[in-house]
Image (tube, rainbow, N blue to C red):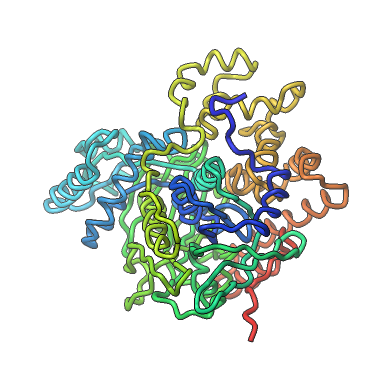
Amino acid sequence: MSNQPGVQILGPEQRREAWQRLGSEQFDVVVIGGGVVGAGAALDAATRGLRVALVEARDFASGTSSRSSKMFHGGLRYLEQLEFGLVREALRERELSLTTLAPHLVKPLEFLFPLTHRGWERPYMAAGIFLYDRMGGAKSVPAQKHLTRSGALRMAPGLKRSSLIGGIRYFDTVVDDARHTMTVARTAAHYGAVVRTSTQVVGFLREADRVSGVQVRDSEDGSVTEVKAHVVINATGVWTDEIQALSRQRGRFRVRASKGVHIVVPRDRIVADSAIILRTEKSVLFVIPWGNHWIIGTTDTDWNLDLAHPAATKADIDYILDHVNEVLVTPLTPEDIDGVYAGLRPLLAGESDETSKLSREHAVARVSPGLVAIAGGKYTTYRVMAEDAVDLAAEDIPSRIASSITEKVPLVGADGYFALVNQTMHLAEQYRVHPYRIKHLLDRYGALVEEVLAYADGKPELLQPLTDAPQYLQVEVVYAAAAEGALHLEDVLARRTRIAIEYPHRGVHCAEQVARLVAPILDWDAATVDREIDTYRARVDAEVRSQSRPDDQSADALRAAAPEARAEILEPVPVWG
């Protein structure tokens, strides 16, 4: 059924078993937060031989980790801020993921950097990109190439001739962030971690002066249990301060949320063969190929409102359109936009008022005996952050623990991926689907592709595409609920697939079909199916309407009014006493 026998299934049965285990076992480490850093910390600890629990209040990657610019990159702009250590570390991690840890998910991506100034800019940028190319050590992407204006326009005919005087081609990588984060969590489960979403930390357990575990509440039905552990790792990103307050301990650092907005437009709206990076007055703007679309972003503004559902405003969208249209032959209009998403970067609070200047370096601290917090950093360096967090947590674990080995641990789906790529035609014939579909599945599931397709045994209709989201097969939706921990329509449409940003209907048109596909797996009755569809439609309606509002406050008020899929989630968690 799979080239990776025994890979942990995250389905309803595992979820029930995980709840029982959380309340009855003694763990070495409990990790709070199912974003990429929390999932990475659970994987790091589990592969050191520790007893690990990972709990997430909502869904894997439901916060920052599903709303990035979709790049595994060193951060070229951080060289200008002289953050050489961060860039070197990130480039090393990029190479590891590209070649060993997640080659099925992390892909090389060609970029064009248009030059706009004669004289100084070409040697200045060439030196920076040369350093960028060299800092990561061994690399699997080509070196930079210098282009004349004509050469640059051959790569990107959609750019105005007047918008550049030449260009530099270089390479970075692209990743489906939400799928990658879920795969890290699933790999942690594969190596023994007890992993459970919709499990919200609502309190801390104490023994004398130390933290000895957490109290958790099921975000679906309100059940409560206690989870005992030698040490707790707070890896909650922009919620770091909120969890810190719950622990009643003074934090060693504070986290500020910076909002980043991206728009998604059809691929035919911009004529180009590569990604494009554009300078703005504050930062940079990326134009990233994403299947049949372009992702364009990002903005960088302070955010002090709802952490769970940051809202994009008309001002955010206009900012992106205005800047990208400065260089496009055919300007984009709001009608061209198929999707919009807003995410929050957890930045370590500094003295500067400009969030784009705050550090992306991470910090880890032992807040009190039994409690470690980690924050900051960037998506690409998640593995290093996780290692640092577990290293510090080791002080509170009574037994001696092994060193981190995650640089040698491929994520589930990685082993066997390259061989299966060479067998694409054979797999297409075996399962009677188009080779294009097999390539699509390999780039989402890697060597687990046969496990996914096995869910269609005796049900050939599941190998048909979704009616209103034909990029995805019906079996992918079934697999999301049966094996990838999806509990709600939102989980499937926004994170296991990316239908919510890839189609103008934002998933509304296929909500009913998807609900009926997952209903038997998740044991939904007719009333639950209707409620899920209504909740998802209300979410999309609120998001779309918020995107016409002029400011954060009015957009947030609209978005926050939409109902939660997780009926028993507490926001914020009350701090008693």
Q: Position of residue 30 (x, y in %)?
A: 54, 60
Q: Position of residue 187 (x, y in %)?
A: 52, 42
From this view, report whether residue 426 is shown above or below residue 186: above
- What is the quadrant of the N terminus in the image? top right
- Counting labels gives 0
Q: Position of residue 324 (x, y in %)?
A: 40, 53
From this view, report whether residue 354 is shown above or below residue 383: below
In depth, the one of 503 and 240 nearer the eye is: 240
Q: Residue at x 58, y 48 (%)?
A: 501
Q: Residue at x 75, y 57 (%)?
A: 535
Q: Position of residue 552 (x, y in %)?
A: 55, 72
In depth, the one of 109 and 263 nearer the eye is: 109
In this image, 507 relative to 259: left or right? Answer: right
In this image, 4 relative to 507: left or right? Answer: left
In this image, 415 relative to 312: left or right? Answer: left
In this image, 142 relative to 561: left or right? Answer: left
In depth, the one of 162 and 513 nearer the eye is: 513
Q: Is residue 449 visible?
A: yes
In depth, the one of 560 and 158 nearer the eye is: 560
Please identify the residue farthest to the bottom as the structure is shown: 577
Please identify the residue farthest to the right as the structure is shown: 526
From this view, report whether residue 402 is shown above or below residue 371: above
Quarter of the image where one finds residue 82: bottom left
Q: Is residue 325 visible?
A: no
- What is the quadrant of the C terminus in the image? bottom right
From this view, report whether residue 48 is shown above or below residue 421: below
Q: Residue at x 38, y 34 (%)?
A: 100
